[in-house]
């Protein structure tokens, strides 16, 4: 069942039924200031950090789900409705929500009145615009009462939900003209406040939640709205809100526009006060002035659209399949921007109060984003590397506000350091900017300990070399990429965290996933050293890579597939010898990508085993058979019911590793089949089962052993976004940046006649047309560049500011 449709020309998903199977959301904002908004007006807003600078309150795991947001109430007589359907849930004569590139539009009508809401955050601006347009489509004069509503969060989103003995006594506001200011804690340790304004004289307001809603009411029927008159309350302690009251009269055919702004202000410590206890409102007034007319808002919105036109013009394909084209050209790239901005911190599934920016997560997110804004990618790489320790290990995460690492969910994830090699080499290949390697980067954010970024990469490489187990395979530490395979945990206390508990820290638990990862990025490190003339380092590193390859062949092969790990006791995990969890996806993916034992047929056998044991209708499950009992020596993985999350669920993030592995042995049909099974636009028809948005990837789809296979969870903030974009563009379509040009090596379905791609690369535009006359999957017979045949599958760096015509003939 569908709940809307794609509008590819407008780059929008159009929702026409508000009762989606789960809230379908969008992200507003591109850099410092962000909002989440659902298809019914739910969501929240924050500046930089969803934990420490939360502007508006949101209650996770609410009943009903997605209650609370940024609402408008329109009252005509006894009828009350909202443009986003919720919270009032009055049946509308028309409803439409359009989620676009960093903006959302609502268009609804009731009783001859049409309401349109445009929500977006202008570029470089610390405020959200909500332009509300009301139009009378009837033949009668309409007299309406309009109420806005937001609920302020008390800044720290975690503290906001727990420290009530304090929070119910701290709320402070000011009201001046048509602006409501939230200044809680401003007089002591904060130099920031927020505000909610409208460009119209108001007839009243409210700032006290209990007075506005009524103690025994909900968002759907606030007392003030039901009564049709504001109370002009000023919040003192308790829970502050912001609600404007406007009286609207519309003649037949008449329309009126109102511009609301939700903004954030920081002031210098010596400029906090206008007078005693009165905050300095000059910065807020300047922000309001900037967008106080429809013309100014339209100009800002047009700038935003041009911004996204430019971002999405870097990579554009024409494949003949609209579902593939819309994923690659629009939605996958858009999601990659969002995951770059948020890592795993803020969504309807990630509360924003625990995890900040992840070390491994952010490095991986870069590979789907670096082509869009390389300079931001470079800054992020330095930020990530700055949280590394001198021995190569890392904080697992850092807070975006301070950029300092924290150990809130533990550390010692031994795969973490290697991802820095991935992000750095992908950045240099995209940009040609080797100067990053010379930049001095701190350890643990201590400038006195700074070394060149190249030294960070070298230390990352040798962190694995210096932490090998009995089989000369990498020690897993607390865990590797699979946070739930906690082989040194041994937890029997339900109050312990699997990720922070290490009851039996040892030197025996080893990871084949890290082994494959090390070979892949060890080879990249060797190649980088060769590029910059560090031959000695390259030779030494290559020796360690070759040793790892031999260790995997000798101790990591189970006969038909690669082992997953050795546990604390030195026993095999992911082996045919095991009762459950005989085969895991991660080691098949990484050892195949590393081509370990390819000549001996190991890669092909491994991928055949994936097809036989792990593949299902909705994607590739993480392990099989799923665990049905608790294995204390395995940790969290066996605590999930069979078919969910890491226990036999389709953990979408790792499916692209198998896609890439399939391209290594030239099986384009298999690679693309796996791609289509989890790509959102291909799942739109099963939205009722899938539940989450049909325009973005999710983290997990219930696997074949689950109660409801195909049901998805945890959408938006997933490494699935970047890895699928990377897999489809660089390995299936096969257009891959390299140090000295663009590598062309497609591995496509045999039925394809070919495809076209426009690829902007290092200042030039490459129009690439791939022809597949023999209907093969892999192999390039000829490449013609601007009319001249070249004898390499790497197109050299071509002249900047020009468009170049490339013809690729497969054969």
Image (tube, rainbow, N blue to C red):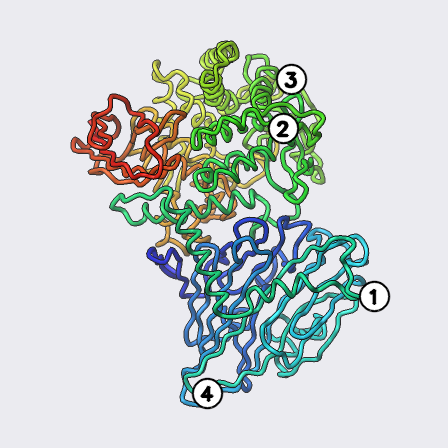
Give the Cα separation between the discs numbered 1 and 3. 63 Å
Tags 1 and 2 in contact by the CB under 8 Å rule? Answer: no
Circle 2 packing at 10 Å, graded few (<14), some (14-19), many (20+), is many
Tags 2 and 3 in contact by the CB under 8 Å rule? Answer: no
- Give the number of callouts: 4
**312 displayed left or right of 205:** left
Give the number of the disc on residue 608: none
> With respect to residue 428, does 91 lie above or below?
below
Q: Of helix, strand and loop, which one carries label 4? A: loop
Give the Cα separation between the discs numbered 1 and 2. 44 Å
**604 displayed left or right of 628:** left
Give the number of the disc on residue 507: 3
Tags 4 and 3 in contact by the CB under 8 Å rule? Answer: no
Residue lying at 69% horizontally and 36% vertically, measured from the top left: 406
Q: Label 2, on which residue?
A: 441
Percent from the top left, x then y, of residue 472?
Answer: 55, 12
Mark closer to the observer (4, 2): 2
Q: Nearer the viewer, residue 276 or 330?
A: 276
């Amino acid at each position: 069942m569908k709940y809307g449709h794609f509008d590819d020309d407008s780059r929008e998903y159009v929702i026409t039924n508000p009762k989606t199977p789960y809230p379908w959301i969008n992200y507003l904002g591109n850099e410092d200031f962000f909002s989440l908004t659902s298809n019914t007006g739910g969501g929240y807003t924050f500046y930089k950090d969803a934990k420490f600078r939360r502007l508006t309150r949101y209650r996770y795991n609410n009943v009903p789900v997605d209650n609370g947001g940024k609402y408008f109430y329109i009252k005509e007589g006894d009828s009350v409705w909202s443009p986003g359907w919720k919270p009032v849930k009055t049946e509308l004569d028309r409803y439409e929500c359009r989620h676009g590139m960093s903006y959302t539009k609502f268009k609804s009508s009731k009783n001859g009145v049409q309401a349109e809401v445009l929500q977006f955050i202008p570029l470089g601006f610390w405020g959200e615009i909500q332009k509300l347009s009301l139009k009378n489509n009837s033949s009668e004069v309409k007299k309406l009462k309009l109420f806005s509503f937001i609920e302020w969060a008390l800044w720290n989103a975690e503290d906001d939900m727990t420290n009530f003995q304090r929070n119910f006594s701290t709320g402070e506001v000011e009201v001046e003209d048509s602006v409501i200011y939230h200044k809680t804690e401003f007089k002591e340790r904060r130099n920031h406040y927020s505000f909610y304004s409208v460009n119209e004289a108001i007839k009243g307001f409210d700032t006290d939640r209990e007075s506005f809603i009524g103690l025994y009411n909900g968002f759907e029927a606030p007392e003030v709205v039901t009564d049709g008159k504001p109370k002009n309350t000023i919040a003192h302690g308790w829970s502050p809100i912001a609600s404007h009251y406007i009286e609207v009269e519309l003649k037949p055919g008449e329309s009126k526009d109102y511009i609301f702004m939700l903004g954030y202000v920081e002031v210098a410590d010596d400029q906090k006060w206008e007078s005693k206890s009165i905050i300095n409102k000059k910065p807020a007034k300047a922000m309001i002035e900037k967008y106080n007319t429809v013309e100014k808002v339209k100009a800002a919105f047009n700038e935003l659209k041009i911004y996204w036109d430019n971002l999405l013009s870097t990579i554009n394909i024409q494949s003949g399949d609209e579902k593939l084209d819309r994923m690659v050209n629009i939605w996958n790239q858009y999601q990659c921007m969002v995951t770059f901005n948020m890592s795993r911190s803020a969504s309807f599934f990630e509360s924003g109060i625990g995890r900040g920016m992840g070390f491994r997560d952010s490095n991986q997110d870069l590979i789907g984003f670096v082509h869009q804004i390389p300079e931001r990618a470079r800054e992020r790489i330095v930020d990530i590397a700055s949280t590394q320790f001198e021995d190569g290990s890392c904080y697992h995460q850092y807070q975006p506000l301070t950029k300092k690492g924290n150990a809130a969910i533990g550390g010692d994830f031994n795969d973490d350091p290697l991802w820095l090699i991935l992000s750095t080499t992908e950045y240099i290949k995209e940009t040609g900017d080797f100067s990053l390697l010379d930049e001095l980067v701190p350890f643990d954010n201590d400038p006195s300990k700074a070394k060149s970024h190249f030294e960070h990469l070298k230390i990352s490489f040798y962190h694995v070399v210096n932490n090998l187990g009995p089989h000369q395979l990498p020690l897993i530490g607390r865990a590797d990429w699979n946070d739930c395979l906690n082989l040194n945990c041994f937890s029997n206390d339900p109050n312990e965290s699997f990720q922070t508990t290490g009851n039996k820290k040892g030197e025996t638990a080893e990871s084949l996933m890290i082994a494959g990862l090390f070979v892949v990025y060890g080879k990249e490190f060797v190649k980088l050293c060769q590029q910059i003339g560090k031959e000695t380092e390259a030779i030494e590193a290559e020796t360690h890579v070759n040793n790892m390859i031999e260790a995997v062949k000798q101790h990591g092969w189970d006969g038909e597939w690669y082992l997953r790990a050795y546990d604390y006791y030195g026993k095999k995990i992911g082996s045919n010898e095991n009762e459950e969890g005989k085969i895991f996806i991660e080691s098949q993916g990484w050892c195949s990508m590393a081509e370990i034992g390819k000549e001996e047929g190991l890669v092909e056998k491994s991928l055949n085993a994936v097809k036989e044991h792990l593949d299902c209708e909705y994607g590739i499950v993480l392990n099989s058979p799923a665990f049905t009992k608790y294995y204390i020596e395995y940790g969290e993985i066996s605590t999930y019911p069979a078919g969910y999350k890491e226990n036999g669920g389709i953990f979408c993030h790792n499916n692209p590793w198998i896609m890439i592995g399939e391209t290594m042995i030239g099986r384009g049909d298999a690679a693309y089949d796996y791609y289509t099974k989890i790509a959102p636009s291909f799942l739109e028809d099963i939205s009722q089962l899938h539940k989450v948005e049909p325009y973005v990837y999710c983290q997990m789809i219930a696997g074949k052993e689950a109660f409801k296979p195909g049901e998805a969870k945890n959408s938006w903030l997933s490494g699935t976004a970047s890895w699928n974009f990377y897999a489809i563009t660089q390995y299936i379509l096969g257009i891959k940046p390299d140090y000295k040009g663009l590598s062309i090596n497609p591995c496509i379905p045999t039925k394809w006649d070919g495809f076209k791609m426009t690829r902007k690369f290092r200042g030039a535009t490459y129009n690439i047309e791939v022809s597949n006359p023999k209907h093969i999957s892999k192999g390039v017979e000829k490449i013609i560049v601007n009319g001249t045949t070249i004898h390499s599958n790497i197109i050299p760096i071509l002249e900047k500011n020009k468009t170049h015509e490339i013809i690729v003939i497969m054969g």
